[in-house]
Amino acid sequence: MKSMTGFGKETFQNDQYQIDVELKSVNQRFLDIQLRAPKEVNSYDLAIRQVIKNTLERGRIEAYINITQTSTGNKEVRVHWELVDQLFGSLQKKLHDTYGTISFDPVESMNQLLNNTDYVEVIEGQETDEAFGDLVLATVAKAVEKIDKSRLQEGEKIQQVLSNYGQDFIQLVTELATFVEVYEKEYQERFEMKLNDWLGGQVDESRLLTEMAILLEKGDIHEELDRLVIHIEKLQELLKQKTPVGRELDFLIQEMNREVNTIGSKSSSIEIKNSVIQMKTILEKIREQIQNIE
């Protein structure tokens, strides 16, 4: 069992660049990958997403990829000479037309232009390393392994919590089933006593049994209790599975809630209604936990 909450980070570095990959995940109904990466990685977008999908099946995944150049070997200075020529030509013409022949120092002017990125800029050379894409994907894969491990560790903690809740729930069901047996017997005795008080000794035994059967059937919750036992056994079985079970657990808890609601609607006993409240409380705690399960 895995949680949908996790974190993984991996870094690769060689003499040309450093690749940093950071993955964060939170609960989400489906798999939602939010990828933030520099333009150098754009061509590997689909491949990166597939690496993540191969391991993670649910959750909102925020993937951050950063590429840092560790060498200046692939940087180059680009001078926009056409703009420089236009600037100097325009200056010379303006000075000549306005003031006559006036000379100016082009070296000093050029020094000033060096700090202006409109004329001179340092750009990153085009990545020519064919292994770059493979290194990016390999770094992503290692980050995925780490986030998967953290999700598994968190899932084991949730599994233990859910297992404990399951034990508490089955104990309530067992206690309620025992109480119902005693309650039905006492209810029958009280019913007979009231009829005798009202009718004296003139009680039709067959009619009494018929009426009693009808009343008991209306309030019979044995079937719901049996199904709850089956559901809780299924819950414990799902908790042991290695494959994603979040959706199945969510459906199972909905079914258990329906059974508990039916028990509450059938019963007028305060003791039974108190048990129903306790069972619904446990089911709500389980439901909150399974929202984080993959």
Image: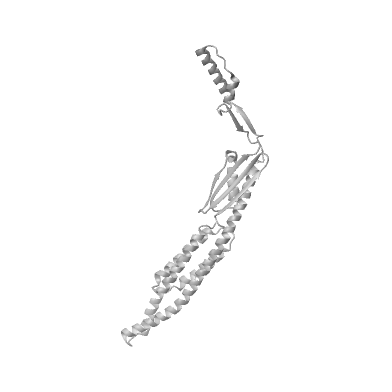
Q: As rendered, which of 190 and 216 lies closer to the eye?
A: 190
Q: Residue 156, located in which quarter of the rendered image?
A: bottom right
**Percent from the top left, x then y, of residue 129?**
66, 38
Task: Relative to 267, say whether 242 is above or below.
Answer: above
Q: Is residue 258 left or right of residue 32?
A: left
Q: How many labels were placed on the picture?
A: 0
Please report the residue visible at 61 percent of the width from the left and 52 percent of the height from the top. Answer: 146
Q: Nearer the viewer, residue 224 or 31?
A: 31
Q: Is residue 107 left or right of residue 276?
A: right
Q: Is residue 219 visible?
A: no
Task: Residue at the far top: name it.
Answer: 100
- Which image quadrant: the N terminus? bottom right
Quadrant housing the C terminus:
bottom right
Picture coordinates of residue 104, whole percent (x, y): 57, 17
Q: Residue at x 51, y 13 (%)?
A: 99
Whether residue 156 appears in this view of the structure is yes
Residue 33 placed where, x, y %? 54, 48
Residue 200: name its quadrant.
bottom left
User: 59 or 23: which is nearer to us?
Assistant: 23
